[in-house]
Image (spheres, rainbow, N blue to C red):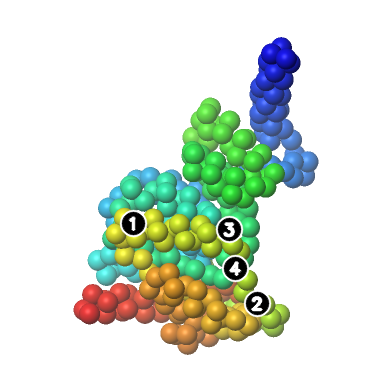
Amino acid sequence: MKKFVLNTLLFVLFSGLFYFIALFFWGKYTPSMLKRNINYKICSYGHIHSRLSEVKKKKDIDILFLGSSHTYRGFDTRIFSKNNLQCFNLGSSSQTPIQTETLLKRYLKRLKPKTIIYEVYPITFMIDGVESSLDIIANDKNDLFSLEMVFKNNNIKTYNTFLYALFRDIFNLNNSYSEPKTRGNDTYISGGFVEKEISYFKPTPFEKETIEINKSQLKSFSKIVSLIKKNKIDLILVYAPIPPSNYKRFTNNEYFDNTMESYSEYYNFNKLMSLNDSLHFFDAHHLNQKGVELFNNKLIKILNERKVK
């Protein structure tokens, strides 16, 4: 019996080691079309590599922005800087609460923000977050927080990509990567913001959709709120403006508003502002620079009014 157990353990260890090594060579040398369960894209869309490189040099800031692409395309750190607010934008594409929790645990103690502005968008509470996890795994150093995130996603792509990323981290294979400041129509701005070359959205009809919050995402969201409050940091939840035609497709916006209001101070800027689909957005989700400036100045006005109260 002891021999059987020992042989089984040796087999498991050998198999695990073989899988780990084989995964590295498969991920490094196999064409993308043949490795659908490994999705490792360093310096991917949205300048996340630049953002996660810069955040390691920041500390003791006034405001930390968290959330999806609405965050890194919606909060221009230059505008806040002009108002004597030192900020960092830690948004990432399709970032769900599961990834927000990971990033917050990793960087909160370093950044020590006085205020956290967390952009909450219904869709990020409805999806699994695999895409965003893969983005973070490939563009940041991995640790136990990454492992926790991978288990929460429980997806073969995140497991394989995480193991492949560990191999690259161990041998420092990513040290030579440097992301250009401008990629296509996007320009990375110090502090985490990405400015899009001015363009305009042409509205199209949207199918109606009901907001149904994923229980796993809500659980992570609750942990985020508790962590922030435990550290006695001011938390403001913000539903950033999206094109009115897109916003109206959701049949139960009040449900989402009520849920967010039950957690912390909350502002739905789709109700507080009257923006135009064609003038203030560059696509179905994101503000163009004209819209960003109007939104940010409105938010700063609210922040100043809060101080007076």
Query: Between marks 1 and 3, how big is the CA–CA gap?
Result: 21 Å
- At a point 37% along the width and 79% down the height, the residue shown is 298
Q: What residue occupies the far left of the structure in this picture?
A: 308
Residue that protrudes farthest toward the bottom in the picture:
274
The residue where tag 3 is placed is: 216
Residue assigned mark 1: 230
Q: Amino acid at mark 2?
A: Thr
Contact? badges 1 and 2 (CB < 8 Å)? no
Cα separation, mark 3 vs mark 4, equals 9 Å
Identify the disc placed on residue 213. Answer: 4
Amino acid type of the residue that numbered disc 1 sits on in the rendered structure: Lys
Q: Along the line of sight, which residue is nearer the eye, 250 or 151?
A: 151
**Which residue is pictured at 69% across the width and 32% down the height?**
23
- In the displayed orientation, state which residue is furthest to the right: 34
Can you give x and y, in whole percent of width and height, for residue 260 in the image?
47, 72
Q: Which residue is mark 2?
A: 210
